[in-house]
Amino acid sequence: MAGIGHNQGPTLEKGHAWRTYQWRQAQKKLMPRTIPLMIVKMRVRRAAELGMDYKAYASLRQAAGRDICGLLFSSNALRILGGDAKMPQERARVLAGLRDAKRLSLVYRPLDPAAVHDANSVLDATGLAPDITMTWSAMHERLCGFVRKQNLVGDQVVIIGDTSLENGWSAAARAAGYLPADRYFGAAAS
C-alpha cells in the first residue's frame, strides 16, 4: 500500500504490462472507430441546414461537443459596407435558407445595428461589433453578452468573418469555431 509521499506511479507488481495491454484492448472494443451511418446522414443533413460543408460542420461539432445553434456573421462577412445597411441579395438568400439556427450579426461603426436589422429581415439579431481599441476582457464581455441575449452559449455559435480580428472573436466568445466568409458562402453556393 502506498504511504505518505508516494506519487501513485505505476505498480511494480508482475503482470503490469499485460494488464495495461488488456485494458487498452478492451477500451478499443468499446469505442467504435467509425460513426454509424445513420448519424453521419443526420450530420450531413444538419450541415446542409446550416449552409456548411460536412467537413467544416463535423470539425466544429466535434470541437464544441454539441450542435451548432447560431451563426454569428460580421458585417464584413455579410458585405454590409459603407452607408448602405442592406446585404447583397445572394448573401440574404443563403441566410434565408438556414434552418433551426439563429442568424446573428455584429456590425462595425458607423453602421447602426438597428438600421442593419431593419434593412435585413433574414437576421434574427444585430449588435455592435467589438472595435480594435477594446481590451480582451471588454471584447469578451461584448461578445458573450450578445450571445447570452440570444439564449445561447458560446460553443453553440460559429463566428463567420473576413478578418483576423474577427477570427479572434472565436476565442473571446468561447465559440465553437471560426469560418472565413469565403469558405462559408462558397460552400452554401454549391
Image (spheres, grey):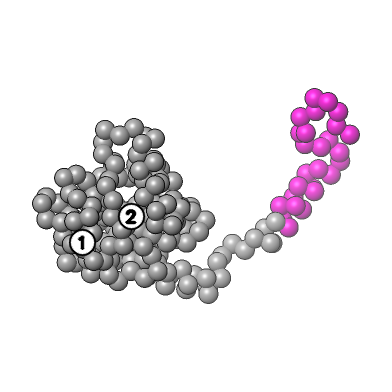
Residue at disc 2, secondary structure: strand
Q: Position of residue 174 (x, y in %)?
A: 44, 46
Q: Is residue 129 above or below residue 53?
A: above
Is residue 147 toward the left or the right of residue 128 in the image? right
| Segment colored magenta | 1-26
Is residue 84 toward the left or the right of residue 116 in the image? left
Comparing 116 with 76, the one in front is 116
Is residue 134 toward the left or the right of residue 100 in the image? left
Disc 2 crowd rating (10 Å Cα; few below 14, some 14-19, many 20+) is many
Judged by depth in the image, the label closer to the viewer, 2 or 1, is: 1
The residue pinned by badge 2 equals 72
Q: Are marks 2 and 1 in contact (CB under 8 Å)?
A: no
State the CA–CA distance, disc 2 to disc 1.
17 Å
Residue in view at x 78 percent, y 44 percent = 17
Residue at disc 1, secondary structure: helix
Q: Position of residue 181 (x, y in %)?
A: 26, 55
The residue pinned by badge 1 equals 118
**Is 13 a magenta residue?**
yes
Earlier sequence position, callout 2 versus callout 1: 2
Comparing 106 with 73, the one in front is 106
Q: Is residue 60 visible?
A: no
